[in-house]
Image (spheres, helix red, strand yellow):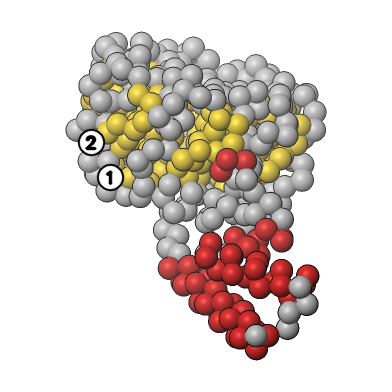
Amino acid sequence: MKRILSVLLAVCLLAGLAVVGAVSANADFTTAPMFTGGDGHSVVLKSDGTIWTCGYNIIGQLGDGTTTERRTPVQVSGLSGVTAVAAANYFSLALKSDGTVWAWGANGYGQLGDGTTTERRTPVQVSGLSGITAIAAGNYGHSLALKSDGTVWAWGCNEYYELGEGTLTNRSTPVQVLGASGVTALAAGRNFSLALKGDGTVWGWGYNSCGQLGDDTRTEAIVPVQVVGLSGATAIAAGYDHSLALKSDGTVWAWGWNEYGQIGDSTNTWRDAPVQVSGLSDVTAIATGSAHSLALKSDGTVWAWGRNDWCQLGDGTTTNRSTPVQVKGLSNITTIGSGKMHSFALKNDGTVWGWGENYSGQLGNTAILAQAYTPIQMKGAGGVGWFNAKGADFPASASAHFWVIWPSWLQFILRYLLFGWLWMGWF
């Protein structure tokens, strides 16, 4: 009997290892993980092309078919093969690998682009778009898409010319932005839009009362105008009313609203043209919240500045900062992102860390109810284990990890045999 049970245990172990090897061999991570968020909700794209959301859900912005607030991640219904996500206040966007765009949540301005103003609790396809390579979402309710031919398309709220098509008419289906060509990246603020061109110049249109278009005026722009004095830009980001650009030399430049120091030039002076963010170099990525800014450095550290009343800077205080401070406790970071008043970072091991406001559960961790002064780890789906943006969620403990790698039928046999071994004196 003992010999038979020993053989069975060995067979089970070998079969399990074969299964684990097959899972690893078949893993096909083709999408770079990314984060975004709105006012109280978060959207995370996993490397397998699925989307996971948490937080506020009053209008269906989590995309799970309900209006139930979620304090740990849930999967967006019916979407796969996603390569990029964008979100703003109460709505979300996704770009699929086939070049189509999908949207869900609030739709009062037509920002979902499906030809209606009906809110959606699950994703619907944006009408008439194909060949899309990038997307952006504006906080007040407009959406942007970049086509592979370098043209830009926009829909939703147009109260301040943020659609760039020459009128003040809201659009529930995409229209082409006038005069935008050769574009490689997009960003959307509250009521304004930005485009990065292949030549390293940045262009903006829409609302400009704070100088957020960077053209050295505070005049609204009906069609794109060039940001003055800026060249060599490789990435852009837009907050409510301020803008950031990352240059190829690793420096960061900012302009617009500066009430909380979000420009990062050690003042609270609004800027109508770009100024350099103080003390930052070797930056590889940037992100913005409503009034705070983030930068990822090449050494894997994260730096933040601007508004901090909800701890969105992650430095352990609620003090606004007009120059960058290091986010506490983070290293080996590869990706950053932000919502209105919360922030995220991805470690190279696939774990996700968040800080700032958490009233609606947008950080994906139930341990903190109001706000996280420093980064906390996002829980796994349903609050089980820990979220992994690069694969299956991590178990809650090492012992749990031993069991999750086995199929359920093997788990049953292994537990039975080990029970007999340890407690019944078999073998």
User: Residue 344 at x, y = what percent?
Assistant: 61, 39
Identify whether 338 is placed above or below 222: below
User: Residue 34 at x, y = what percent?
Assistant: 50, 45
Residue 251 seen in this snapshot: no
Say which quadrant the N terminus sits in: bottom right
Most extreme residue toward the left is: 128
Q: Nearer the viewer, residue 95 or 245?
A: 95
The disc at residue 228 is: none
Amino acid type, callout 1 = Gly
Q: Nearer the viewer, residue 322 or 355?
A: 355
Identify whether 72 is placed above or below 385: above
Q: Which residue lies under the disc numbered 1? A: 99
Give yes or no for contact between labels 1 and 2 (Cβ–Cβ under 8 Å). Answer: yes
Q: Which residue lies under the disc numbered 2? A: 129
Q: For mark 2, does the 10 Å Cα neighbourhood hold few (<14), some (14 to 19), or many (20 or more) residues?
A: some
Instruction: Label 2: state its secondary structure.
Output: loop
Q: Is 44 on the left or on the right of 427, as rendered?
A: left
* Residue 373 found in image quarter: top right
Say which quadrant the C terminus sits in: bottom right
Residue depicted at x 62% and y 41%: 383
Most extreme residue toward the bottom is: 3
Q: Is 314 on the left or on the right of 411, as rendered?
A: right
